[in-house]
Image: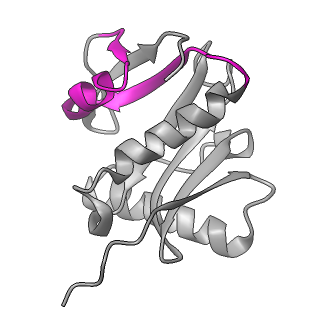
């Protein structure tokens, strides 16, 4: 019998508040999804993690979803969301959408802000359903077509 789905519990961390175990889990998840599964060859530790707010989604104390939020001016003029991932065991259950809503809820606590991101081209419609609009033609990023997207400043 398959165990019942556990609720996803989100945690927000600055880089400094990520202990060694959490940091290892984050870097392992990013390598599993982006480097191994998607076969991207890129330098993941890009220095921006130090500036980021990290949003981690746990199911039964196991990391299943992650993204980072970068402050305005560090990647785009707007605040930016990146490194969005859901691990295979949590896909198809709305975990990624819940993760994005959690990140936007956190960002909008003090009022709406504009957000930017670089979406894999196959996910443009998925991000579009959350209010993001394409702002570029497709371009290559680590061997995968991407599209710049932006969500204007408005509440969820």
| Percent position of residue 23, x then y | 64, 65
- Give the left or right position of residue 125, taking residue 18 as reference: left
Measured along the vertical axis of the image, is residue 136 above or below residue 62? above
Where are the magenta residues, as a range? 110-136
- Give the left or right position of residue 27, taking residue 49 as reference: left
Tell me the quadrant of the picture where the N terminus can be found.
bottom left
Residue at left 26%, top 53%? 38
**Residue at the extreme bottom:** 1
Residue nearer the viewer, 97 or 81: 97
Residue at left 53%, top 42%? 102
Residue 148 located within the stretch drawn in magenta: no
**Where, by quadrant of the figure, is residue 79 drawn?**
top right
Question: Which color scheme did the rendering employ for the protein?
Answer: one colour
Measured along the vertical axis of the image, is residue 123 above or below residue 8? above
**Where, by quadrant of the figure, is residue 112 drawn?**
top right
Residue at left 29%, top 69%? 89
Residue nearer the viewer, 46 or 120: 120
Residue nearer the viewer, 66 or 49: 66
**Residue 151 in view in this figure:** yes
**Where, by quadrant of the figure, is residue 136 drawn?**
top left
- Give the left or right position of residue 82, taking residue 109 as reference: left
| Percent position of residue 95, x then y | 36, 53
Residue 127 located within the stretch drawn in magenta: yes
| Percent position of residue 135, x then y | 36, 8
| Percent position of residue 109, x then y | 69, 29
**Residue 41 in view in this figure:** no
């Amino acid at each position: 019998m398959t165990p019942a789905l556990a609720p996803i519990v989100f945690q927000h961390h600055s880089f400094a508040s990520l202990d060694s175990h959490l940091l290892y889990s984050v870097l392992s998840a990013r390598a599993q999804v982006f480097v191994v599964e998607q076969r991207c060859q890129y330098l993941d530790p890009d220095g921006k993690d130090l500036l980021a707010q990290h949003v981690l989604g746990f199911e039964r104390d196991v990391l299943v979803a992650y993204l980072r939020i970068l402050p305005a001016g560090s990647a785009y003029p707007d605040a930016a969301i990146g490194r969005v991932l859901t691990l295979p065991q949590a896909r198809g259950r709305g975990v990624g959408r819940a993760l994005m809503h959690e990140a936007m809820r956190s960002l909008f606590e003090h009022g709406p802000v504009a957000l930017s991101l670089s979406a894999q081209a196959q996910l443009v419609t998925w991000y579009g359903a959350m209010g993001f609009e394409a702002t570029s033609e497709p371009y290559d990023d680590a061997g995968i077509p991407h599209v710049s997207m932006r969500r204007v400043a408005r509440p969820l």
